[in-house]
Each structure stands twice: as C-alpha cells, then as structure tokens.
Amino acid sequence: MKPIKVVGGPGIFKKVGNLGKAVTKHIANGMKQVPEEEYKKRLIVCSKCEFHKDMRCQHVSCGCFLSKKAWWESEKCPLKTEEFPEGKWPKLDIVSKPDEEKLFD
Ligand code: SF4
C-alpha cells in the first residue's frame, strides 16, 4: 500500500468553487440528508483520515466543513486511490428528508 501524501488544502478560490459545486449538487438532490447513523460513520472515517484537519477535509477537491458535508446525501469522499477507488465513503443513494434546519445551524 502506497502512503497518501497530503500537501496542504485547496486555496481560497478553489475552496469557494468546490463549495459552490457541492451546494448546487445538494440543492439539485432535494437537499436530502443521510440518516444520523450514516453521518456518524462518515465522521468516524474522516476522523482517522490524513486529510482531516480541524473538522475540515483538506483534500484539494474539497476543503468543506465535515460537519456539513457528511450530512449531505449528494456528497462523497473525494479521495480516489488504488486502495479507495470510490473514496473512503461513497455517495449514498437513499430517500431521506430535507435538511433545511441543518443548513444554518
Ligand atoms: S472526506 Fe475523505 S478525504 Fe476528506 S477527510 Fe473524509 S475520509 Fe478524508
């Protein structure tokens, strides 16, 4: 297994662009959220990840706050390696309820 090299997070413009894409996908997906159990599982995986720093994903394709990203059904881990071809947690296609109350807390 090849170690994953972490070289800082995305710059501010990349982060803003990534956030815009994530919000657009989330809205297009009906603002659905994953069940709490799945949310917690995702955060546990992230907490052990080399890209996790201060509750943010420092992957260059992300930069998101994990406390939000992990709730959104439309999101997935951005990592793509031989070991994790679908990321460390994949997108979950399930029916769930809108998370309007989670957006602004
Ligand atoms: S989303 Fe993926 S790459 Fe980012 S911190 Fe979580 S497990 Fe790591």
Image: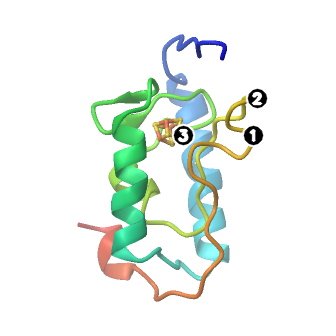
Task: Tell me the quarter of the image containing the C terminus.
Answer: bottom left
The residue under the point 57% across, 43% down is 88
Residue 24 placement: quadrant = bottom right
Q: Is residue 45 above or below residue 53?
A: below
Do residues under tags 1 and 2 come within 8 Å of each other at their CB atoms? Answer: yes
Question: Residue 32: percent from the left, percent from the top?
Answer: 52, 79
Q: Which residue is mark 3?
A: 16
- Report whether residue 65 is seen: no
Residue at x 43%, y 31% (from the top left corner): 49
Question: Which of the marked residues, 2 or 3, is nearer the chain's N terminus?
Answer: 3
**In this view, which residue lies farthest toward the left?**
105
Name the side, left or right, on which 77 lies relative to 102.
right
Q: Residues within 10 Å of mark 1 (few under 14, many from 20)?
A: few
Looking at the rendering, which quadrant does residue 38 occupy? Answer: bottom left
Tag 2: amino acid: Glu
Residue 35 percent location from the top left of the image = 41, 77
From the image, tell me which residue sits under label 2: 82
> Residue flagged by tag 1: what amino acid is it?
Pro
Q: Is residue 47 left or right of residue 5?
A: left
Callout 1 secondary element: loop
Q: Which residue is mark 1?
A: 85
